[in-house]
Amino acid sequence: MMFDRLREDIACIRERDPAARSSWEVLTCYPGLHALVLHRWAHACWQADLKWLGRFISQLARWFTGIEIHPGATIGRRVFIDHGMGVVVGETAEIGDDCTIYQGVTLGGTSLTRGAKRHPTLGKGVIVGANSQVLGGFTVGDGARIIQAEADTLREAVAARMGFSAYGVTQGDDPVSQAMRSLIDNAAGHEHQIALLWAAIEKLAAQNRQLPLEPCVPQDAATQETFDAEGLRRKVT
């Protein structure tokens, strides 16, 4: 049973992390895996009422991996703690199967009441981004992940065509990253406008070269996008 879980953990890491080149590398070099294995020992001690031993094992795991998981926490199968440094998981936290947790995440409590449900519950397949602070005894539903993923995916595609990798830009409050995101969004809008203009021109040429241009230009092509130099200047300053 223990080795089956270990093989399952290694397989899920190799599936989700393209940097993992072999099972041996995952087994020996991934602190997230080490923290989970040690947590299973600590959790077993905790459930057997060996509280001190469970806490001592969790403390050893913290020293060796930089990941602090309380022995009372419940963790499901195929959980991947990527990088992991600074991750903190509280006593009453529950992590569902197939979750992914990045570095700096805190699953913390907001109550001082002993025995109460003080820490969050993550459903199956939840992704918690780096440095997220998830506090309180509430439940995060199955499959919860990045908000506005469709918009971010579109921005990545446009950025790739421009020769710029938006993956390297912080998606937070950094003003430089916000300016770059605005520029990329503007470029996407201008590209759409140019495509509409080309379609209108081709349609006009196919019908009759003597017809005036204005009636054949789609209304959204003429009015949907405008070049606002002052607005663009404000975004980058």
Image (cartoon, rainbow, N blue to C red):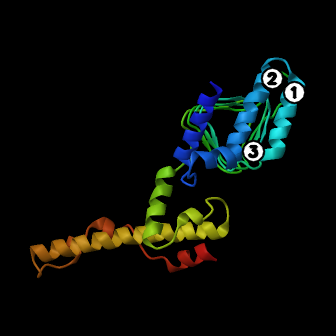
Q: Which one is in front, 60 or 226?
A: 60
Quarter of the image for residue 136 reads: top right
Say left or right for 34 vs 193: right
Mark 3, secondary structure of its residue:
loop
**On screen, residue 166 above or below 69:** below
The residue singled out by tag 2 in the image is 45
**On screen, residue 134 above or below 232:** above
Task: Indicate the position of residue 192 as horizontal and vertical percent values.
Answer: 36, 68
Which tag, 1 or 3, sits closer to the chain's start? Answer: 1
Q: Which mark is residue 87?
A: 3
Q: Are marks 2 and 1 in contact (CB under 8 Å)?
A: yes
Badge 3: residue crowd in 10 Å (few <14, some 14–19, many ≥20): many
Q: Which mark is residue 53?
A: 1
Quarter of the image for residue 115 reads: top right
Q: CA distance from mark 2 to mark 3?
A: 22 Å
Task: Indicate the position of residue 32 as horizontal and vertical percent values.
Answer: 69, 43
Q: CA distance from mark 1 to mark 3?
A: 21 Å
Amino acid type of the residue that numbered disc 3 sits on in the rendered structure: Val
Tell us which disc is closer to us: 2 or 3. Answer: 2
Amino acid type of the residue that numbered disc 2 sits on in the rendered structure: Cys
